[in-house]
Image (cartoon, coloured by chain):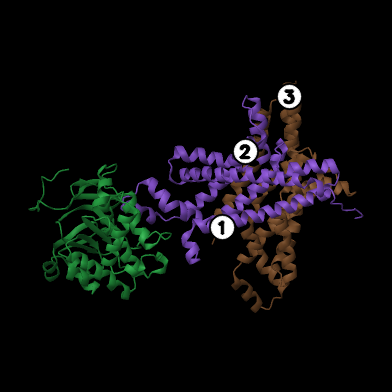
Amino acid sequence: MIQLNANHFLYLLQAATWTLLLSLIAFVGGSIVGLAIALLRVSKSAVLRGVASGYIQLIQGTPLLILLFLSYFGLGIAGYKLVPIVAAGLSLTLYAAAFLGEIWRGCIESVPRTQWEASDCLGLNRFQQYAYVVLPQAVRLAIPPTVGFMVQIVKNTSLASVIGFVELARAGQIVNNSTFEPFTIFVVVAAIYFAMCYPLSLAARALERKAHVGR
Amino acid sequence: MNYQFDFAFLAERWPDFVAGAWLTIQLTVASIALGLVVGTICALARVYGGPWLRRPVGAYVELIRNTPLLVQIFIVYFGLSSLGLKLSAEVSAVIALVVNGGAYTTEIMRAGIQSIQRTQLEAADCLGLTRLQTILHVVLLPAMERVYPALTSQFVLLMLASSITSQISTEELTATANLVQSDTYRSFEVYIIVAVVYLGLSALYRFAFWLIGLVLFERKRRLGTAL
Amino acid sequence: MSDAEAPREEPRDAIVRIRDVVKEFGALRVLDGVGFDVAPGQVAAIVGRSGSGKSTLLRCIAGLETVQAGSITVCGHDVGRPGSAARAQLRRDVGMVFQSYNLFPHLTVERNITLALTLVKKESRDEAMVKAAEVLSLVGLTDKRTAYPEQLSGGQQQRVAIARSLALQPQVMLFDEVTSALDPELTAEVLAVMEDLARRGMTMITVTHEMGFARRVADLVVFMHKGKVWEIGPTDELFARPKTAEFSQFVSSEL
């Protein structure tokens, strides 16, 4: 049994950078797909709306862990062996896309009807309405809840540990397996997560307050 | 994809899935009920309590909401065990879920309780109701009615999050899936089935909450309007 | 609690006794040495412009606000200071009706009335329901027993609010601009209930803008201005012979 020392702490911090990297991948990927989902949800076609809605309900009704298992073990058996980071990135992207899509749809729909009418009267076509009038306003509304969801993404990367990706939670387990001090180790791991997430939570709340003041 | 789907194992293994789902239901119903109690008490403390109450509750909420459930579960199961408190996997799971769910419920109930106007409290005060009576009869039910959709979503999420307890060998639905797929190598099928079961459970829980809402909120049942 | 330096002859049986009350909100002094008495069975109308302190005074009498100086005695209990043990007893003796009715929206009319009866007066459900039926008939709303507040008009809700306070059989009823939020047609039905109450001998203190009602029903009129009692006296006398310019201006502006 090895004593806990500073090297272990450094190891955890290194793993935390992988947490941040995976979070970034999930956020960027989830944003791209999420934007598509949001736009589909407000489209004129009932079929497209239904597809997007079905996707959201499907993802929001299943545990993220199952999604991870499907993309790692499931696809693995089917012949598509993905390395853990890719499987995790894929699952988290699909997961984030559903939630971000729902958040952003709400923001698009919160842009007052009068903005649509005014831009229509000015002769803008649908694409121009979106690009120049509606989306910019929706984006401003979307910033606080999106920043808030980033906290969820960072926390959810901990599940990637289950399919073997060495991020912070997995690193904690590895250190524990050689030092057997689970309480200390996992409290330190929690503290590192807290250090990453709390600033984001504070930022989200501050942005939320600013958004309301500006109205 | 030239993968041959084969669901034959179901004929033999379906009782395992039922058992797993049943444990998931038991764990989460207990956690939801206790989490609601914890969340309501903490929310009341946050809204009506003095600073010596508000600060610890606030700290509790921030700590839980900014750390992953997986790590919280490890602390309860492995961490407490190493300190001498050996708890079973199921008990650890419930404790972790209650602590986690309680924090999120606190924030939701806080919003509900704060939406009750001060004038309602003044009217109750003038009628002679004690603080406790006012909370029980004037504040709690309307507060809960206002945030009921958010509460329902939160509890469904908690049920889905219970899948994480599979990591401390609680034999709930996800753990069952892992077990069956390691026996049969039909990973894709197993996880698809379990995903469908979770979807079914989500719908079941939402329906149950809707029914409970009808029972609790008499005015809404009779008039159909929002409070 | 000093009643030694009363400037004028005071009725020994004053049920509400206010002496030199000072109320501040931070740096703002809203009540600046207010004092008068209300005898049992009297109807006192407190009038004045917005900001004169009349609602604040009523809230102090009800025990909803505490005062920085002076004393307020209701039915023998000193209620002005914080931490008064008398305030619990006060609740049984004083009923308060608010401008915004403050009915409990999730309870039926009947339950709104029986709630305090069962919880505070510890009556049984059956006893409480009988009492509720009585007060509801007093205000003319027997048929709305099982309705919810949102199904009633403003005037009906206010009458239920009056019934709710009445059910506790208070000795003094306080009314805080209870018709100000109502449309004119609905004001009349509420004023009628109040007039009826006065006829039955209830001690009432009402902050009101309804000058017609005040002249018709009040025994005592208290005109407040800048946090002080500017003029006070029996209704007819006060309106017939206003002593101050402010009160004359106020009366003519309200007509």
Q: Are marks 2 and 1 on the same chain?
A: yes
Crowding near pointer 3: few (<14 within 10 Å), some, many (20+)? some
Crowding near pointer 2: few (<14 within 10 Å), some, many (20+)? many
* Residue type indicated by callout 2: Ala
SS category of the residue bearing label 3: helix
Q: Residue at x 11, y 49 (%)?
A: C6
Which residue has dot 2 on it? B96
Q: Are marks 2 and 3 in contact (CB under 8 Å)?
A: no
Q: Nearer the viewer, mark 2 or mark 3?
A: 2
Instruction: Report which quarter residue B33 is drawn in.
Output: top right
Which residue has dot 3 on it? A179
Q: Nearer the viewer, mark 3 or mark 1?
A: 1
**Could you tell me residue C86's position as x and y percent?**
25, 44
SS category of the residue bearing label 2: helix
Q: Residue at x 11, y 52 (%)?
A: C13
| Chain in brown on the image | A
* Residue type indicated by callout 1: Leu
Which of the two residues, B158 or C35, is positioned nearer the viewer here? B158
Instruction: Report, in whole angstroms, how far the alpha carbon at label 3 lies from the one at label 1.
Output: 50 Å
Crowding near pointer 1: few (<14 within 10 Å), some, many (20+)? few
Q: Is residue A119 visible?
A: yes
| Chain in purple on the image | B
Instruction: Report, in whole angstroms, how far the alpha carbon at label 2 lies from the one at label 3.
Output: 24 Å
Instruction: Report which quarter residue A166 is drawn in.
Output: top right
Which residue has dot 1 on it? B211
